């Protein structure tokens, strides 16, 4: 899965905004002001940082060479996913969704309700 398609996938979720808080070299995807994905589109190989459940993050790193601890992130909660074909596209999409869902779950219930994302944590 190429970077352009991953960015499109990030933007397909409700209430997501694409921002450039660190300057033009880093795209940051947020829900309700909270980051769930980051990428530097001019870097090669392409990669994206995604939030991940800590136990799952370890398992993914052990089973996929294209998934490493989050580059410049809290390595317990973030993975870097290479977008060079080493990680299957279906898994990349699922990991983006997982990251988004984790951030949504961390929002206050009232904010989730206001956004129409449900009051219960998934």
Image (cartoon, helix red, strand yellow):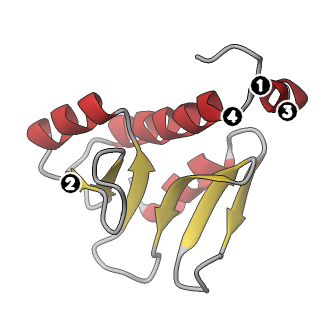
Q: CA distance from mark 4 to mark 1?
A: 10 Å
Q: Nearer the viewer, residue 26 or 10?
A: 26
Q: Which of pointers 3 and 4 lies earlier in the amino acid sequence? A: 4
* Residue wearing tag 1: 117
The answer to whether 81 is drawn above or below residue 40 in the figure is above
> Residue 117 in the image: x percent, y percent?
77, 25
Gap in angstroms between the C-alphas marked 1 and 2: 30 Å
Q: If you read the primary sequence from the N terminus, does the residue marked by circle 3 or circle 2 appear first?
A: 2
Mark 4 lies on a secondary structure that is loop
Gap between marks 1 and 3 measured at Cα = 5 Å
* Residue matched to label 2: 68
Tag on residue 115? 3
Distance in Å between CA atoms under marks 3 and 2: 32 Å
Residues at badges 3 and 4 in contact (C-beta under 8 Å)?
yes
Few, some or many residues within 10 Å of mark 4 (<14, 14–19, 20+) = some
Q: Which mark is residue 16?
A: none
**Residue 22 sits in quarter:** bottom right
Q: Are marks 4 and 1 in contact (CB under 8 Å)?
A: yes
The picture places residue 30, in percent across and down from the top left corner, at 66, 54
């Amino acid at each position: 899965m190429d970077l352009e398609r991953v960015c499109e996938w990030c933007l397909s979720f409700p209430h997501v905004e694409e921002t450039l808080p660190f300057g033009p070299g880093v795209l940051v995807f947020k829900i309700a002001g909270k980051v769930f994905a980051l990428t530097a589109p001019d870097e090669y190989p392409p990669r994206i940082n995604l939030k991940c459940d800590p136990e799952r993050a370890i398992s993914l790193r052990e089973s996929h060479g294209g998934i490493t601890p989050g580059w410049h992130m809290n390595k317990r909660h973030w993975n870097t996913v290479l977008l060079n074909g080493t990680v299957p596209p279906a898994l990349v999409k699922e990991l983006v969704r997982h990251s988004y869902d984790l951030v949504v779950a961390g929002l206050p219930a009232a904010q989730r309700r206001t956004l129409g994302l449900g009051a219960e944590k998934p």
